[in-house]
Amino acid sequence: MAGRHEVPVDPAAGPVQRFAFELRKLREEAGGVTYRAMAKRAGYGVTTLSQAASGEQLPTLPVMLAYVRACGGDAAQWQGRWQQAVEEAASAGTEEGLAGEESPYRGLARFETGDSGRFFGREQLTADLFDLLRRRRFAAVFGPSGSGKSSLLRAGLIPALQHSQEPGLRPAAIRILTPGDHPARAHAALITASTAGSGGADTFVIVDQFEEVFTLCHDGDERTRFIDLLLTAQQPESRLRVLLAVRGDFYGHCAEHRRLADALRDANLLAGAMNPAELRDTVVKPATAAGLTVERALTARLVKEIADAPGGLPLLSHVLLETWRRRRGKTLTVVGYEAAGALEGAIAKTADEVYDRFTESQAATARRVLLRMVAPGDGTADTRRPAERAELETASRQETAQVLEALARARLLALDGDTVELAHEALITAWPRLRYWIQENRERLRLHRKLTDAAHAWQDLDREAAALYRGSRLDTAWEHFSGAPREDLTDLEHAFLTASLAAREQTLRAAARVTRRLRALTVTLSVLLVLAVIASVAAYRQRQAADAARQVAMSRQLAAQSATLMGTNPDLAALMAVHAYRMTPTSQAVEGLYTAAAMPLRKTLRHLPRTPVVSVAFSPDGHTLATGDRDGRVSLWDTPTGSLRRSLPIEPGIEATSDRPLAFSPDGRTLAVEGGEGQVRLFDIGTGKLRKSLADQTAPLVSLALSPDGRTVAAGGGNSTVMMWDSSARRRFLRSLAASTGSLAFSPDGRTLATASTDNQVQLWDMATGGTLATLSGHTDTVHSIAWSRDGRTLTTGSTDQTVRVWNAVLPAPATAINTICRAIGRDLTQIEQSRYLPDQEAEQHPETGCHPDT
């Protein structure tokens, strides 16, 4: 299909036509692809794509990028061309006679009282604030950073008060102030003078950025005095009315002052977000008042985007200003909006453009100046900090002035007489470069702000020595600022730090003189002390020798008495031997100690009939010992006393196996006994009565084990079978396991049973299913014993092959096991799986196994 015929464009007619010409050329180089084919690739309609290259107006950035990608062009390269075309078109519009016009938008700068004619969107909030002041003499408006509080006060409330006809709200004067570093000192006279009023009318004091009493004023007493001065507006005779404008995240700080919290309990207003209609007025009405128009698409897009950006009014105002600078004729367009960087990127774009035009030296000055005007937050967001010009100037004053002028021209800074500050706190969060500088130097900034405050306090106290840094504060400041460039510190800060160091050196020299005097005195006292010590040591040694002789005699006497009592009272003899050795280890005491140690530690338990004892078992609490002999007798012994408690009723004449297995339940109340002829008998330890008999084995038992919960009894017989019963039910047989076993052991969680057998192997059984989990091979002879670690992760086995093996008893998931095997044999899992599906006729089989080599 042939491409659509287009009206020719003249690339020399202007930047719009030249850009359209270049787009058409790109399409031709792509083989003359049709707009219908491009629409399928780009996701835009044929008409939209054709208008992008019509030359009537610049396309929006998304449409242009879609056009370029559909033709196989470089999106990044074409975005740069589009940006250049937008800038050239904006410059051409300015040259057509629009350069002298004043912008209807303020950008980051706040609205002033003279801007009420272009302040829109806050009419309802202004009326609510006016009504609040009608009802309360002391009130506050709270709102997040970027909600327009400063502009609301100046361009909304103050004009409303000035034109008020209500007697109570007709002000004698209106004073607007910001607290600063020393609010009480700076504004006490103004507030006191306002209290008296004039001619019965009230004086309104509006405190903007009230949060500065917490961020900039570090003197708690001065902060309290300032707040108390403002609260005098509540007194009946006062002719003062006060309105505070406070950032919302400092609401909790206000609550910490009891009187302030009580005054604002029902006298505050929240400046919330604008609704869509108010946002539309903010965008359209200032332009209409200036004889301009705003594209409907741009208005709709701004309203939608700003609704999702809390505190985004400064961003909106700035991007509108930048869009106005890139207007097309008398119209603010989406293209100009996108060229400005859109809502989130406009401030960063403007700031970066100004910064990139600086020389290397100017850029360093700009960084220093901007960081001076930031107060790092402590549990709150970072805030702007007003600074005096004298604080910002260094030896290169001209360069500092050039940087300040450039930043102010871009409306990034606000210059007010000798005071300089950021145009808005939104610059802190919206400009990534500044945000990175702050984050990189946050701790240093905090220390620098403290150093600045301390230096000013020192200056205010006529450079009193007591106000200088000392100790750890001086060490920390010196560590951070000793190697800093000279420009980083003002003359006052440098003088303060130098004076602090000089004072410390003076203190050290004075301390050295005192130390020398003390050293001489110490030498004299030391000589006297040595003489006194020598006399004391001599007396002490004499006493020590007498004590040692007495202890040797006592040790020998106790050793002799121990030897005398060894045959008649061995326990007392052993205690005396220990006491003799601890008193003094004489040869007699050592001999008595070794003689006592050779005696049996406990007692000898003897069966009355002389029959071989083939098995023993301790109860879990260690208070009961069970013994089994070859004739079938099972006896219970009390271990503390060594006395026989009782013999369990095993039928006489039933000969036990060579190793009669015994096993206590975990609670120590039940004893499992091999009862002969393959039987397992469960006895109650407290009464000695038989609870039940489990008799499903047909061969003699060689091992017994009870699960940790005591419910399952496992017995291994000589017929290569392990039988299991539920001990809580009446003779309930669970299952049998085909295992030739000589030893059994349950895991601590009771989920696994380990069996050690005569075939040199250990098997792990799943108690839930009865299936084999794993077979542990490695011993070369019979495995006789097996034991679990307390956490159940390790298994230990002992064998006739004279080895003890420690096994990892934690079984991995099948997928993990497969991966482990693949790594061990050096093969890829994909190769192994593919080899399984090779047709038989294509597989080269191994001559012995008949398997393909890959399997």
Image (cartoon, rainbow, N blue to C red):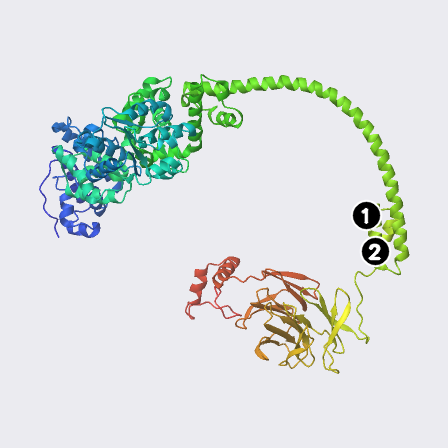
Res. 726 image quadrant: bottom right
Kindly identify the residue that appears in the image at 87 percent across and 50 percent down: 558
303 lies left or right of 665: left
Instruction: Please state which amino acid type lies under the numbered disc 1.
Output: Arg
Question: Distance from label 2 to label 1 (Cα)?
Answer: 13 Å
Q: Which residue is mark 2?
A: 574
As drawn, the label of residue 582 is 1
Instruction: Please state which amino acid type lies under the numbered disc 2.
Output: Ala
The correct choice, above or below, for 688 with respect to 452 in the image is below
Task: Tell me where residue 615 appears, x and y as whole percent.
Answer: 73, 71
The correct choice, above or below, for 228 with respect to 742 in the image is above
Task: Tell me where residue 300 appears, x and y as whole percent.
Answer: 18, 44
591 lies left or right of 482: right
The correct choice, above or below, for 157 with respect to 828 in the image is above
Q: Secondary structure at mark 1?
A: helix
Nearest the viewer among 83 and 303 is 303
Kindly identify the residue that appears in the image at 71 percent across and 74 percent down: 660
Task: Tell me where residue 516 appears, x and y as whole percent.
Answer: 66, 18
The correct choice, above or below, for 144 with respect to 720 in the image is above
Q: From where the camera sits, is residue 352 visible?
A: no
670 lies left or right of 145: right
Q: From where the camera sits, is residue 706 visible?
A: yes
Q: Secondary structure at mark 2?
A: helix
Task: Tell me where residue 141 appears, x and y as whole percent.
Answer: 29, 37
- Number of other residues with Cα within 10 Å of mark 1, as a class: few under 14, some 14 to 19, many 20 or more: few
Res. 608 image quadrant: bottom right
Nearest the viewer among 184 and 304 is 184
- Number of other residues with Cα within 10 Å of mark 2, as a class: few under 14, some 14 to 19, many 20 or more: many
562 lies left or right of 257: right
Whether tag 2 and tag 1 are in contact, CB under 8 A, the answer is: no
As drawn, the label of residue 341 is none
